[in-house]
Image (tube, rainbow, N blue to C red):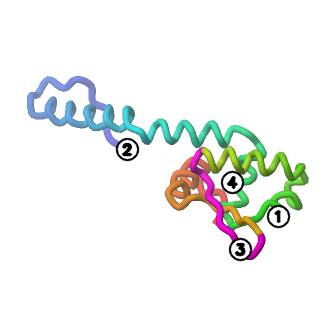
Amino acid sequence: MATARCCPADCALRSDWEDELRSEKEMLSGDSVAELLNYMKLLGHPLRLNIVLMLLKRDHCVCEFWHVLKEPQNLISYNLKKLKDGKLVESYYRSNHKIYKVRAGAEPVLRRILGDPIR
């Protein structure tokens, strides 16, 4: 952990300090914060969180979610659509089944948010 500094008087130190603060400000104002906020809002619903936790382990179809989560199929499909619209999940077809998986770009962020619950 970095040592705490506040408004250093030395010009050389002040320049480094201002550079650090500038980079932190850029990090907070970027699209990554909005994306992270969107992910957290989506994961705020217990069913969506359970779906994502299952998908972090492996790809699933709706019937598998239905079997494990014991929720109506239309409710599972609705929440999968919300996750898909939020760019957390994507789908593909295997035979006649639509299979869902975590979007590749979202997986590292999800593992970081959730503390990598599935290994």
**Does residue 22 sit above or below 51 in this rendering?**
above
Identify residue type, mark 3. Arg
Numbered label attached to residue 64: 1
Q: SS for tag 2?
A: loop
Viewer-nearest of labels 2 and 4?
4
Give the quadrant of the N terminus: top left
- Mark 2, residue position: 1
Q: SS for tag 1?
A: helix
Dot 2 or dot 4, earlier in sequence: 2
Dot 3 or dot 4, earlier in sequence: 4
Disc 3 from disc 4: Cα separation? 20 Å
- Mark 4, residue position: 52
Q: Which residues are magenta?
A: 86-96
12 sits to left or right of 99: left
Question: Which residue is more in the foreground, 72 or 3?
Answer: 72
Magenta stretch containing residue 87, yes or no?
yes
Q: Position of residue 46 (x, y in %)?
A: 76, 42
Disc 2 from disc 3: Cα separation? 47 Å
Identify residue type, mark 4. Val
Q: Quadrant of residue 17?
A: top left
Which residue lies at the image location 83% right of the left edge and 46% below the top edge? Answer: 75
